[in-house]
Amino acid sequence: MLKYAAKVFYDGRLGDWRYMQNRIKRALLASKVSSPPFKLPLASRTDSGVWCLSQVISFNSKVKLKSLRRINAYLPRGIRLYALAEVSSDFSPRKALKRVYIYIVPYSGENLDIMRKAAELFIGKHDFWNFCVAKREESTVREVTNIFVSEAAETIIMIFEGPGFLNKMIRKIAWTILAAGRGEIDLEFIQNRLERKVDSKVPSLSPQGLILYSIEYPQPIKFKYDNSALTDIREYLTKEKRNLEVFYALTNLSLLKLSTTRNFK
């Protein structure tokens, strides 16, 4: 039995991570790549509405895969496996070194300097209880390594980097940063909640505009890219480019600019 890791493109309008996971499991069975029962672990559990440009999954295969066409043939156009690597039996996509998310929202006069100061407060290791949805017994201490805030073409772009994020954590931090930029809250509001001087959870920003952009592992994975799948993604994004988050993906997504040196033939 072989074990593979694969990168997945996913249109978040189709549903959440459970929908994507279920469709890929069905495709693996229909293509006779895997046999039941089996699990399909994935790197990040995204909400409905969140696009995935580089989700990572792993699965066992009965056959040596030379391309991803036999699996993608059973998937809707909004889901594509586009890169593949053979991995060791103990590989887990959950054990990532860094996850990168990008949030894209329309610019409506927010104070970017204040937004950047608000973002700086979240960098480092904190108790994010006020900025997530979690069970009482679950640890809510996490580390955020970087948050970048910029503006271009009347669009605010926020980039979040860290080893891992709690449920709704990025959406709540993004709401807070935007609220600070709009003058709706001050920096003390944020500091008090990070230090747990106040226990009052903040709202979540809409998932529209949030993208799982990339995932890195302690040992780099030597993925091979499937040209047919990349072509499908290019065509799909081109047709959907009127959507704000997809337009950004189309113009900036590194997977669309990959060389063919390590691609499947």
Image (tube, rainbow, N blue to C red):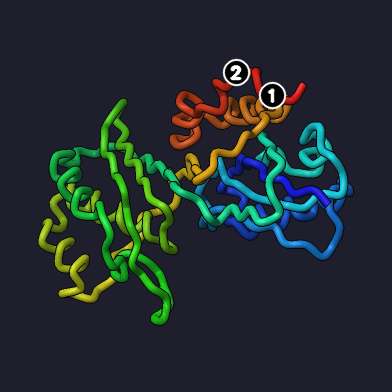
Query: Of residues 90 and 54, which is closer to you in this image?
Result: 90
Secondary structure at numbered mark 2:
loop
- Residue 133, by quadrant, is bottom left
Marks 2 & 1, CB-CB < 8 Å contact: yes
The residue at which mark 2 appears reads as 259
Name the residue located 43 percent from the left edge and 56 percent from the top edge: 164
Query: Of residues 179 and 53, which is closer to you in this image?
Result: 53
Is 108 situated left or right of 248 in this image? left
- Residue 239, by quadrant, is top right
Above or below, 176 against 208 in this view is below
Work out whether residue 251 can be spotted: yes
Q: Position of residue 89 (x, y in %)?
A: 71, 54
Above or below, 131 against 221 in this view is below
Name the residue located 60 percent from the left edge and 46 percent from the top edge: 56
Is 25 situated left or right of 49 in this image? right
Q: Position of residue 78 (x, y in %)?
A: 65, 40
Q: How many marks?
A: 2
Above or below, 46 against 261 in this view is below
The residue at which mark 1 appears reads as 263
Work out whether residue 53 can be spotted: no
